[in-house]
């Protein structure tokens, strides 16, 4: 698939129109990100932000009751500047709308300017995407300068994702559609491309048999919080694996793209997704683990189990943890397992990619009976660092070796401010840069691989395994690794 690029009209005035403008994502992420973009002069000079909600607020009420009370606390204290904040608020308009009402779209049209770039940010449930786009089109709000941003999860399976993509595609060309996965906006994720394609030393080693295993972990300390209504229908596979973890896997596994052009990068990621070995029912039973947290303690604080959380049905089978072993059927990665793992209420917040290189075929230097391989550990959060685990001589007489880290602390190496993922991605949308967004075929290939796992789980009738909050997941996850005599990264430190 190639994307027909709309002619980039630079510096048009911008109307940023946010559906779901009073929702969680807006006040936690989008509005603080837009404030930061404004503070650093990254919004076009003539920008307006139109937020859409159902509450019958006036503009002043929206500012006082929403922006000041809900959004402001999510702005980093040291970045807050009262003058800039006031100027930022002056960009806002609140549009009360019922997204089902055709007349309301005409009111939106009156509120928005003509001859500007309209960016429609759909931060609503994906069930509404089709409907909103149809109505925007009927009210003649979409033109060749418009762009639409679609929040994840896009659909709940392949068929619903295809349906949404087709419906949105009736009104927007592929180059106008920004399917967001905020992991692609993280500094370290972008840096992974530079690590791989800017450094010659890794090139020849980045394949089987020199790499014997890859681990990708996204562990969170938080529980489901107030999002049970969404999360219970979604679960960790749809919420995290189908998008964030598979995108990380793509960047680790893709072939060098011919350039950083959006289609060049996305073509290579697509090939990885299409090379993922489909999981049979036997693979699912053997190579996947799903879990659900039970009461425990995180950071010394007692926390509830998932089933005790507000709005979670007592018999819920939603998984809050997934670990699985995936394989990529191509020349570079044949027989190299990719272990993916994510969970809520885990022992600590950490997102990292660990590349385990193969051990020496034969060692002449004693290593205390252990066979160490080199490991490259790319930590995305909470710290941004890259460590290369090497073997060095243990000081003293005799020749013994022990692992030590070559440690690149990216926060120390680059002291400049780092934009948050949403800020960076919003600026990309405004400037028309599609590289860090998912193309339709990519998204659908990710669903095509993930969906059989969901079906397999539902057919098996098994419940997710319980794991105590504050641990690294069910024992079966450790066992998944132990089968090939391996351990998850935290157990080898
Ligand atoms: C979101 C998920 O996409 O990513 C959340 O819906 C999850 O459930 C969040 O908590 C994690 O993002 P981050 O940037 O905090 O790792």
Image (spheres, rainbow, N blue to C red):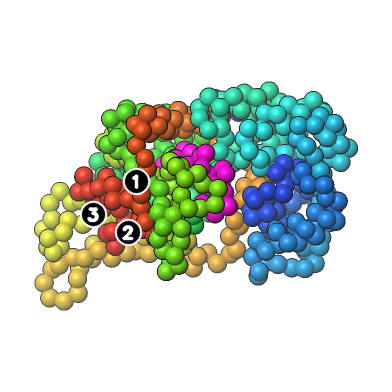
Type of secondary structure dominating the magenta stretch: helix
Q: Nearer the viewer, residue 144 or 111?
A: 111
Q: Is residue 123 visible?
A: yes
- Depth check, mark 2 against mark 3: the one in front is 2
Q: How far apart are labels 2 and 3 at the CA level?
A: 16 Å
Pinpoint residue 476: horizontal percent, then vertical percent: 28, 47
Q: Earlier in the sequence, mark 2 or mark 3?
A: 3
Which residue position is annotated with label 2?
Answer: 490
Residue 399 lies in quadrant: bottom left
Which residues, given as a range, are shown in magenta? 224-249
Instruction: Kindly identify the residue that appears in the image at 46 percent across and 35 percent down.
Output: 269
Pinpoint residue 69: horizontal percent, then vertical percent: 73, 61
Relative to 355, 186 lies left or right: right
Residue 291, label in figure: none
Q: Is residue 130 magenta?
A: no
Residue 465, label in figure: 1
Which residue position is annotated with label 3?
Answer: 373
Instruction: Kindly identify the residue that appears in the image at 21 percent across and 65 percent down.
Output: 402
Q: Earlier in the sequence, mark 1 or mark 3?
A: 3
Pointers 2 and 3 in contact (C-beta within 8 Å) = no
Q: Is residue 243 magenta?
A: yes
- Depth check, mark 2 against mark 1: the one in front is 1
Q: Is residue 198 visible?
A: no
Pinpoint residue 259: horizontal percent, then vertical percent: 52, 38
């Amino acid at each position: 698939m190639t994307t027909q690029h709309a002619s980039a009209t630079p510096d048009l005035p911008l109307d940023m129109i946010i559906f779901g403008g009073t929702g969680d994502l807006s006040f936690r992420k989008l509005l603080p990100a837009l404030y930061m973009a404004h503070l650093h002069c990254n919004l076009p000079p003539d920008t307006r932000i139109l937020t859409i909600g159902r509450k019958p607020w006036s503009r002043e009420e929206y500012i006082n009751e929403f922006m000041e009370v809900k959004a402001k606390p999510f702005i980093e204290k040291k970045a807050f500047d009262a003058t800039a904040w006031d100027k930022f608020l002056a960009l806002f308009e609140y549009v009360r709308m019922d997204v089902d009402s055709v007349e309301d779209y005409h009111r939106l049209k009156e509120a928005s300017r003509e001859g500007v770039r309209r960016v429609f940010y759909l931060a609503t449930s994906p069930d509404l995407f089709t409907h909103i786009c149809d109505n925007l089109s009927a009210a003649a709000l979409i033109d060749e300068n418009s762009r639409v941003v679609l929040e994840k999860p896009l659909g709940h399976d392949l068929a619903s994702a295809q349906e949404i993509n087709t419906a949105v595609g009736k009104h927007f060309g592929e180059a106008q559609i920004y399917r967001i996965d905020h992991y692609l906006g993280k500094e370290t994720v972008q840096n992974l491309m530079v690590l791989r394609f800017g450094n010659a030393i890794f090139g020849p080693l980045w394949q089987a048999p020199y790499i014997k295993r890859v681990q990708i972990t996204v562990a969170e300390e938080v529980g489901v919080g107030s999002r049970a209504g969404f999360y219970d229908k979604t679960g960790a596979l749809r919420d995290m694996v189908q998008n964030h973890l598979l995108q990380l896997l793509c960047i680790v596994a893709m072939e060098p793209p011919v350039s950083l052009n959006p289609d060049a990068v996305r073509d290579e990621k697509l090939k990885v997704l299409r090379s993922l070995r489909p999981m049979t029912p036997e693979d699912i039973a053997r190579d996947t683990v799903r879990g659900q947290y039970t009461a425990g303690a995180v950071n010394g604080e007692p926390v509830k189990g998932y089933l005790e959380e507000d709005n979670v049905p007592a018999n819920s089978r939603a998984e809050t943890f997934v670990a699985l072993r995936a394989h990529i059927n191509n020349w570079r990665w044949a027989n190299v397992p990719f272990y993916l793992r994510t969970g809520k209420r885990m022992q600590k917040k950490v997102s990292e990619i660990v590349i385990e290189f193969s051990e020496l075929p034969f060692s002449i230097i004693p290593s205390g009976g252990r066979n160490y391989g080199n490991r490259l550990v790319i930590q995305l959060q909470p710290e941004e660092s890259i460590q290369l685990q090497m073997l060095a001589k243990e000081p003293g007489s005799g020749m013994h070796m022990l692992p030590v880290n070559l440690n690149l602390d990216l926060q120390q190496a680059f002291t400049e401010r780092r934009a948050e993922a949403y800020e960076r991605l919003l600026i990309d949308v405004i400037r028309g840069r599609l590289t860090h967004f998912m193309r339709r075929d990519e998204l659908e290939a990710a669903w095509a691989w993930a969906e059989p796992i969901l079906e397999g789980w539902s057919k098996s009738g098994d419940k997710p395994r319980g794991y105590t909050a504050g641990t690294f997941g069910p024992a079966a996850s450790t066992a998944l690794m132990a089968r090939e005599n391996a351990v998850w990264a935290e157990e080898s430190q």
